[in-house]
Image (cartoon, helix red, strand yellow):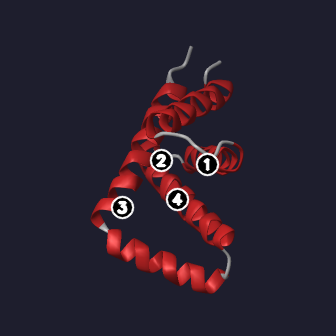
Amino acid sequence: MNLLWFFVAIVLAMSDILHTTIMWKVFNNFYIILGGLIQQATKTTWQTWLAHEIMEAGFHFIVLSIVFLNPIIGILAALIHFVIDVSHTILIRNMGEIEHRALHFVVESLFFILIYGF
């Protein structure tokens, strides 16, 4: 079995941790100001949240496209990560950090197994 699915899932998990670290620990003040600007432009909380998720997907697209030198992997990774984030935010309200990371890794792994595992 080709292990590309595993490497993509691992790099996507690392990209998610990198995104969290960069945005909330390094550029915290900028990120809060950006969120306020987006909130003013969109006027609703759910549109602001959706804009954040789209920007996060863009971040994952860039990181995975560079790591694997393949924009298709970047698109697929960003898309599945976006779908999982939107789905679990709507369907599962209270989720801890470990559960959040585990859900992403399991679903993303299954997704990439279907594509690259066989």
Q: Secondary structure at mark 3?
A: helix
Residue marked by disc 3: 24
In which image quadrant can residue 5 be found?
top right
Q: Are marks 3 and 1 in contact (CB under 8 Å)?
A: no
Disc 3 residue type (three-letter): Trp
| Image coordinates for residue 68, horizontal then vertical, percent | 46, 42
Question: For this rendering, which residue is in front, 80 or 104?
Answer: 104
* Quadrant occupied by the C terminus: top right
Earlier-in-chain disc, 4 versus 1: 4
The secondary element bearing badge 2 is classed as helix
Categorize mark 1 by other alpha carbons within 10 Å: few (<14), some (14-19), many (20+).
some
Could you tell me how far apart the alpha carbons at marks 4 and 1 are, in whole angstroms? 10 Å
Which is nearer the N-term, disc 2 or disc 4? Answer: 4
Marks 3/2: CA–CA distance? 20 Å
Query: What is the distance, in whole Å, between disc 3 and disc 1 at their CAs?
Result: 17 Å
Q: In the image, 81: left or right of 34?
A: right
> Real-space Cα distance between discs 2 and 1?
17 Å
Label located before the other in sequence (3 or 2): 3
Q: Which residue is mark 4?
A: 56
Helix, strand or loop at label 1? It is: helix
